[in-house]
Amino acid sequence: MTSLRGAHVIITGGSEGIGRAMAAVAVERGASVSLIARREEPLAAAAAELGDSARWATADVRDREALAGAVATLVEQAGPCDVMVANAGYARPGRFWALPAEEFRHEVDVNYLGAVHAAAAVVPSMRERGSGHLCFVSSTAGLLGVYGYSAYSPTKFAIRGLAESLRSELAPDHVRVSVVYPPDTDTPGFAKENEVKPPETAAISGAVKPVPARKVAVAAINGIERDRFTICADPLTAMLARGAGLLGPVIRRTMDRQVRATQRHDQTP
């Protein structure tokens, strides 16, 4: 079991959304929390809201050296990292042929390599100490491809592969690994996605009510404390995680019907 009482938890993408909510729950469980993101103002506001148990440092997760430097500063202030939550990420929905070529690279750099860089900043110390916990934030779209997320979904599938590999590699060092699969979540990032979603994607998303960020955060923190590898916050994602091979075809057919219905509606004079 991973105890958060007195633990130092570092969260990338911690200034808003799921990261900020996870920080709040971790503090409630007795942890000391460090937040990392690019923008100073929301970081400072989030840390101030969390109180004396929180601190922050700015870094772009795409920059491995800058992120390592931010982690080193926070470790100097609060001690070794006991739990690293690689949460930083974003999505820009759009049809494959309409997205700029550079968008695919950018989402890989932020969503996938950002998680790699976060893990790289703490794994050596965790291995040396023989303890620690890595928590990667994927997505339901990391279990099942969704119309309009051809740039985003593959990066979240990659997170799953990274976590599964590290789980095996780090087990002899007693370093635990978890993957969180949030569904559509009520966050500022999700609101931005809604502004640019293709109608077909909006129809699929509209069939499922987004969950509060705190609900995802509580599920994630509970999973970390119980050393669960797979962490889900809603029944549908949990079923997908257990049996995507069986449920995938059913859900894909449902989404295909929603796409066809939306396209027929848009073509109606």
Image (cartoon, rainbow, N blue to C red):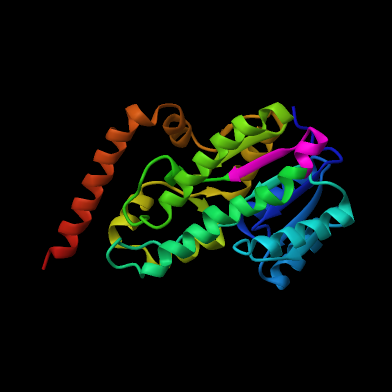
Residue 98 in sight here? yes
Q: Which residues are magenta?
A: 125-136
Taking depth in this image into account, of 78 and 261 the one nearest to the observer is: 78
Q: Residue at x 43, y 55 (%)?
A: 152
Q: Position of residue 28 (x, y in %)?
A: 79, 44
Magenta stretch holds residue 127: yes
Quarter holding the N terminus is top right
Asked whether, in this view, residue 60 is left or right of residue 82, the answer is left
Q: Position of residue 262 (x, y in %)?
A: 22, 56
Taking depth in this image into account, of 188 and 4 the one nearest to the observer is: 4
Q: Position of residue 119 (x, y in %)?
A: 66, 47
Quarter holding the C terminus is bottom left
Image: 216 above or below 248: below
Q: Residue at x 24, y 52 (%)?
A: 259
Asked whether, in this view, residue 224 is left or right of residue 105, the answer is right
Q: Residue at x 81, y 63 (%)?
A: 48
Magenta stretch holds residue 140: no
Asked whether, in this view, residue 29 is left or right of residue 154, the answer is right
Taking depth in this image into account, of 90 and 114 the one nearest to the observer is: 114
Residue 232 in sight here? no
